[in-house]
Structure formats: structure tokens, C-alpha cells
């Protein structure tokens, strides 16, 4: 691209090598989660949430299990102030939940923030000022020392206000635009703030290191976090928090690698809502941990419900391929994927398998409220016999012989190809019943009586062109006897190559279903299925269906 020379790398590596995190393989425990849906998330919406919507969202975050929730920037807008007051005055904050409020490092803003918190049992007061080279030079036009002074002013005032105002306050400091800040400077300013707050292991402060704008690959951020963790004053009294945005699409990677690098806490949103490309998606992060056997300590067992609440309140849309949550993320249309999933699911049924290893499905969709039918195996012209057969079996109970699955697979694909659309389970069932089940197009089976002698004798009544005919045949069993009667009457030449029967468990419980494959002189197998309360009748119907389809 012709303008490439306009760009350069705008981040800063730590002054020493910080790569211990790279030796670690996975995250071993859930971090402290803080939802910023009602602040960062809300401030990025085309239409911000109303007071009532914020209250509903807050209650829902509590239901999911968040213990820390940033509820806004109360000094910035009347609605945010009112919302904070409403939560406190109407006693909507459970005892084990802490609200968090954001403030700039300016006296009247800090004071208004503390006023907004009057009566709160406990709260996090989150102080920030911007520290990056770009912001210092272009926006604030201040030296490093002047930027430190802003932070120190706010830190001191928080100490003062905490004494003046009633309540149990915890402090948080964010060097905003951390990722565009020289690491030594970010460390210096955070340590200045820590030294003012003098936290102890029993009274910790939060140092939040935001990816305000994503400027680097995630391993750079992880090295920056490791450097901060290694060098922050009073590390045992500091909760290191991450607040990744997603400009380069690495919000989740930044968070995961940042946790490996020593961070304790994550600020993010549901579905990654937030400024520009959003904040990190806490659902993805949590379920990534879950998929490796680590309890995320948030309840994401009903993603469809969470999606409904989120879409209604934010007026945003959850992207179809959003990890774990999107409509299509468990869907398999392709034949080979469907086949592998169907086999994987069967393999699980055989024995109680402890661990989930089904191909193509990183977690069991059922664990997060998704259905196999409709969510996993979806049928279009790309689909294969495995998936189509699996769907017919799971939803309607028909367990076709393998070769018949193949035949039926072609029938379904051809309909989907022709209509150029996805087929729903009912349409697939419809194709099966219309094309294979109890087919009586050329002649009808009215009744059959059997007498066992040396051989089985069948006396069969059929209807051909509106006329009843009585035909007789013998054979080594009932089906063979009926088949011989039909062959003799019509002069057909075929052999029965496959026969299978089973009880139909789903739907009408008392029915039996049979499948018959017959091969003519050309060797091609024609399939038919029969269903009846009587197993003999269903097998004869299956044969009649196959012959009628010849
Ligand atoms: O993205 C950011 O840097 C922020 C800060 C206020 C933490 O939202
Ligand atoms: Zn942010």
C-alpha cells in the first residue's frame, strides 16, 4: 500500500528482557473479573442505555456472577450520577458486589465522584490520567513531571476524600494510554501513586494497565506486564489489572498472555462491546479457561439468554462468528465435519467419557445453553450423509443403515442444491417420509396372512390400478414369502440385500421401523422404509416401498 511509510511501531519494549511468561502454558485460575459494560461499554453505544436499562443490565451482571462492576463516570453526566445514586439509595447492590466509578484527576470531578458514592458500603474509585508520548505531546502539551504531578494530585485527593466521606473505598489507578508510554515512565508514575496510597496486603490497591489502543502483538504487551509486575512497589499489596481493547483483534490474546505474565484482574465487557473495536470479550476469555478445565467463576450456562438481554439493552448485534456466542460458531454444514461430529458424539455415548474431545467442537454446546439440533448439524448442499443421518436419528429416531444414509444424503443435498437454501430438520424429515417411507405409488399393500408349513406361505392382498389382487408366495420367512409373491406377480428381478429394524423411540413410542435395500440386475440398491405398530407389517411395508421406488 502506497502510504505504508506513514506508519511505524508506536509501543515501547521494557528496558530488560521479560519473557518468563512465555514458559507458562495455560491459565490455572480465574482472575478477578470486573465488568466495564456500564461505563466503557455504554459510552461507546450509538444510543447509550437509559437509567432503567442500566439497572436491568446491572442486575443481570450480578446474576452472571460479577463481583466488581464499573457503573460509570458519575461526574461526567447526570444520568451516570443518577444511576449511581439509584443503585445505592435503592439498595440494589448485593453485599458481595463492589461498584467501581471512574474519575479524572481533577478536584471538582473527584469530589463529585465521592458525593455520588455517599452511602455505598464499599466501592472502587478509579483514577486515571493519560501518560503516552502522543497524549503528552499533542493533547496535554505537558512534560513527564507535569503528568506525574497530575497523577499525584489525584492520588493525594483520593486519600483525603476517603477520610472525609463515609464508606469503604478501594483505589485504582490507570496510566491511560499505557501501551503508548515508555515502560520506565509508566512504572515511575504507578510507583509514585502507590507510594502515596501506601497499600498493604490487607488493603490492596489496583494498578490497571490498559491497552487503551492496541499498538503491538500480544507478546509485547505480556512483556510489558511482566516488567510492571516485577518492578511495581509493594507488589504484594497491589492487584495488577488489565483492560485490553481490541484494535488489532488481540484483546483476548493480550488478556491471556497478560495473565501468564502475572496480572490478577481483568476489566472487560460481554461480547467485547466497547470503544471502537471494543474491550476484551469476557465471555470468550472465561470460556477459553472453561474449555481447558478451569472454572471461570462466572455463569455462562445460558448464552442465548445473555445474548437476548445484551442485544435488547445495548441495541448491538452479536456477530454470527463471535467465539462461543455467535449463532454459527458450533454449526457444521460440511459433510466431513458433520460426519466427524456425529461419530464423536456416538463414541461418547458408548462409555461415560470423562473429557470432552468431540472433533470440531471445542466445548459441549449444551454447557452454554446451545442445542445440538439447529446449532450444530445444519444441512445445506455442502452437507454429508453422516450429518443428515445423525440429524434424522437425533431428532426423529430413524437410525438408517449406513448405505441408506448415503442414498438419503444425496436426496437431501439435491433438494438443498435445487432450492439453494439451508434445510430445517422438519424439511429433512419431510424428504425422508415422502421419498422412502410407506411408499405405495405403483401398488398398495392391503393385508397379508401367513401360514407356517415346511416353508412360510404368505397370502397377500394388494391393490394395483384400483383393483384388489390376491397373490401367494412361499419363502424362508414372512418377508421372503411376500417378496416371492410380488416377484411372481409382477415378474420383478431383485434380491433383498439389506434389512434392518428397530423400535422408534422418539415421537410415537409404540411404533417399529424397518429398512429394506433391494438390488436389481444392475446391482444398484434401492431403499425403502416402513413404519407400523406391528414389526412384520413395517418390514413388509419397507419392502413394498423399495419395490415401489424401483
Ligand atoms: O481504555 C482505557 O484506557 C480506559 C481507562 C479509563 C482505563 O478505559
Ligand atoms: Zn477502556
Image: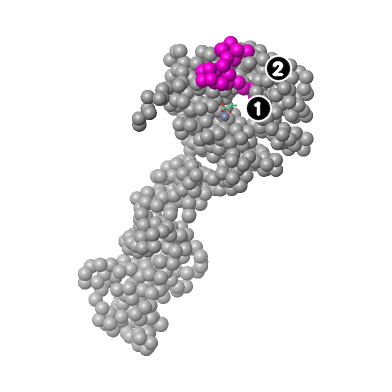
State yes or no: Cβ of the residue under disc 1 lies below 8 Å from any atom of ligand 1: yes
Residues 444 and 39: in front is 39
Q: Is residue 464 visible?
A: yes
Residues 263 and 537: in front is 263
Identity of the residue drawn at 70% across and 40% down: 51
Q: Residues within 10 Å of mark 1 (few under 14, many from 20)?
A: many
Residue 376 is situated, as x and y percent measured from the top left of the image, at: 45, 51
All told, the count of numbered labels is 2
Identity of the residue drawn at 51% across and 37% down: 284
Residue 17 is situated, as x and y percent measured from the top left of the image, at: 43, 15
Of the image marks 2 and 1, the number of the one nearer the N terminus = 1
CA–CA distance between discs 2 and 1? Answer: 14 Å
Q: Which residues are magenta?
A: 126-149
Q: Which residue is mark 2?
A: 157
Instruction: Tell me if residue 279 comes above or below residue 300 in the rendering.
Output: above
Q: Where does ligand 1 appear, by image quarter? A: top right
Residue 130 is situated, as x and y percent measured from the top left of the image, at: 58, 21
Q: Is residue 24 left or right of residue 267?
A: left
Residues 84 and 396: in front is 84
Q: Is residue 306 left or right of residue 365?
A: right
Amino acid at each position: 500500500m502506497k502510504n505504508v511509510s506513514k506508519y511505524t511501531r508506536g509501543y515501547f519494549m521494557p528496558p530488560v528482557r521479560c519473557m518468563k511468561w512465555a514458559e507458562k502454558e495455560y491459565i490455572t485460575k480465574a482472575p478477578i473479573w470486573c465488568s466495564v459494560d456500564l461505563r466503557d461499554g455504554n459510552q461507546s453505544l450509538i444510543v447509550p442505555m437509559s437509567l432503567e436499562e442500566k439497572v436491568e443490565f446491572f442486575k443481570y451482571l450480578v446474576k452472571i456472577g460479577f463481583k466488581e462492576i464499573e457503573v460509570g463516570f458519575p461526574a461526567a453526566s447526570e444520568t451516570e450520577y443518577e444511576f449511581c445514586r439509584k443503585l445505592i439509595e435503592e439498595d440494589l447492590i448485593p453485599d458481595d458486589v463492589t461498584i467501581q466509578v471512574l474519575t479524572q484527576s481533577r478536584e471538582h470531578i473527584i469530589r463529585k465522584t465521592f458525593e455520588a458514592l455517599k452511602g455505598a458500603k464499599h466501592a472502587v474509585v478509579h483514577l486515571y490520567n493519560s501518560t503516552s508520548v502522543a497524549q503528552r505531546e499533542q493533547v496535554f502539551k505537558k512534560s513527564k513531571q507535569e503528568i506525574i504531578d497530575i497523577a499525584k494530585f489525584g492520588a493525594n485527593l483520593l486519600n483525603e476524600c476517603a477520610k472525609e466521606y463515609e464508606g469503604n473505598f478501594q483505589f485504582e489507578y490507570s496510566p491511560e494510554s499505557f501501551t503508548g508510554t515508555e515502560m520506565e515512565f509508566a512504572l515511575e508514575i504507578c510507583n509514585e501513586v502507590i507510594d502515596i496510597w501506601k497499600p498493604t496486603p490487607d488493603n490492596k490497591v489496583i494498578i490497571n494497565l490498559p491497552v487503551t489502543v492496541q499498538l503491538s502483538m500480544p507478546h509485547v504487551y505480556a512483556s510489558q506486564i511482566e516488567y510492571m509486575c516485577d518492578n511495581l512497589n509493594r507488589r504484594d499489596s497491589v492487584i495488577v489489572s488489565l483492560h485490553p481493547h481490541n484494535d488489532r483483534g488481540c484483546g483476548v490474546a493480550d488478556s491471556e498472555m497478560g495473565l501468564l505474565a502475572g496480572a490478577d484482574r481483568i476489566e472487560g465487557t460481554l461480547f467485547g462491546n466497547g470503544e471502537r473495536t471494543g474491550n476484551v470479550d469476557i465471555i470468550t476469555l472465561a470460556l477459553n479457561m472453561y474449555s481447558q478445565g478451569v472454572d471461570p467463576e462466572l455463569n455462562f450456562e445460558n448464552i442465548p439468554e445473555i445474548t437476548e438481554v445484551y442485544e435488547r439493552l445495548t441495541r448491538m448485534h452479536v456477530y454470527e462468528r463471535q467465539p462461543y456466542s455467535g449463532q454459527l460458531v458450533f454449526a457444521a454444514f460440511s459433510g466431513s465435519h458433520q460426519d466427524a461430529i456425529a461419530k464423536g458424539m456416538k463414541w461418547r455415548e458408548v462409555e461415560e467419557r470423562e473429557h470432552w474431545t468431540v472433533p470440531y467442537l471445542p466445548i459441549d454446546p449444551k454447557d452454554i445453553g446451545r442445542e445440538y439440533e439447529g446449532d450444530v448439524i445444519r444441512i445445506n448442499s455442502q452437507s454429508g450423509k453422516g450429518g443428515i443421518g445423525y440429524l434424522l436419528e437425533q431428532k426423529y429416531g430413524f437410525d438408517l443403515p449406513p448405505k441408506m444414509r448415503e442414498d438419503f444424503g444425496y436426496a437431501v443435498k439435491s433438494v438443498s442444491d435445487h432450492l439453494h437454501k439451508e434445510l430445517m430438520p422438519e424439511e429433512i424429515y419431510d424428504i425422508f417420509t415422502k421419498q422412502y417411507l410407506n411408499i405405495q405409488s405403483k401398488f398398495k399393500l392391503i393385508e397379508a396372512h401367513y401360514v407356517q408349513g415346511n416353508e412360510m406361505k404368505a397370502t397377500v392382498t394388494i391393490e394395483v390400478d384400483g383393483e384388489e389382487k390376491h397373490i401367494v408366495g412361499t419363502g424362508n420367512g414372512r418377508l421372503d414369502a411376500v417378496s416371492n409373491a410380488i416377484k411372481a406377480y409382477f415378474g420383478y428381478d431383485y434380491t433383498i440385500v439389506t434389512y434392518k429394524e428397530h423400535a422408534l423411540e422418539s415421537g410415537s413410542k409404540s411404533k417399529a421401523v424397518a429398512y429394506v435395500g433391494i438390488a436389481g440386475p444392475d446391482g444398484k440398491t434401492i431403499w425403502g422404509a416402513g413404519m407400523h405398530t406391528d414389526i412384520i407389517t413395517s418390514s413388509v411395508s419397507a419392502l413394498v416401498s423399495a419395490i415401489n421406488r424401483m
